[in-house]
Amino acid sequence: MTPHWLAQRLTSAVAGMAAALALFTAAPAFASSQLGLASWYQVGKQTANGEPYNPNGLTAAHRTLPFGSRVRVTNLKTGQSIVVRINDRGPFIKTRIIDLSRGAASFIGLKKSGIAPVRVDILERG
C-alpha cells in the first residue's frame, strides 16, 4: 500500500506537470504558420489597401490576412527570413501562398529564382 502522503505528492506533481505542459504547448491565438510557395511581383501602381505600391518596400500580398498584419517569411532553401507587412491581395495563382515585394524577395534570396518554398509565420494580425 502506498502511504497517504506519497499519493498526495504524486497527485500534486502530476497536476503540476500537466499544468506546465498546457502552458508550454498553448500558443497565442495569433500564432500560426503556413507552408507553401512564395513569389514576388514588381508590377502595380496601387495596393489593395490603397497605398502606392513600393517595389523596394518590405510588404506582401496575401489572400486572407487582414491588412497591416505582420508575418515572418522564411525561404526554406536559403534559411533567410524577413518580416513583412500585408498591404495587398494575392497571389492569384492557387499553388502560391504569398507574393512578396521585390525588396522583400531580394532580402531572402527569392528574387533570382522567382519562386521558392517558404514558411509564413503570423506575428501580428492587423
Image (cartoon, helix red, strand yellow):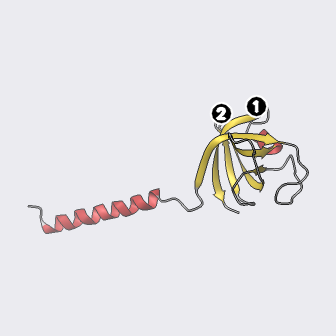
User: Disc 2 marks which residue?
Assistant: 77
User: Disc 1 marks which residue?
Assistant: 113
Secondary structure found at label 2 = loop
Q: Nearer the viewer, residue 97 or 9?
A: 97
Q: Which residue is at a point 23% across and 65% down the rendered structure image?
A: 9
Tag 2–tag 1 contact (CB < 8 Å): yes
Q: Which quarter of the image is occupied by the C terminus? A: bottom right
The amino acid beneath tag 1 is Ser
Q: Residues within 10 Å of mark 2 (few under 14, many from 20)?
A: few
Q: Which residue is situated farthest in the right direction here?
A: 45
Query: Does residue 102 sit above or below 65 in this rendering?
Result: above
Query: Does residue 59 sit above or below 49 in this rendering?
Result: above
Q: Nearer the viewer, residue 71 or 94?
A: 94
Q: Earlier in the sequence, mark 2 or mark 1?
A: 2
Q: Nearer the viewer, residue 114 or 17?
A: 114
Locate residue 102: give its quadrant. top right
The amino acid beneath tag 2 is Lys
Q: Which residue is situated farthest in the top direction here?
A: 113
Q: Which residue is at a point 61% across and 47% down the rendered structure image?
A: 34
Locate residue 19: give its quadrant. bottom left
Image coordinates for residue 71, horizontal then vertical, percent:
68, 53
Identify the disc placed on residue 7: none
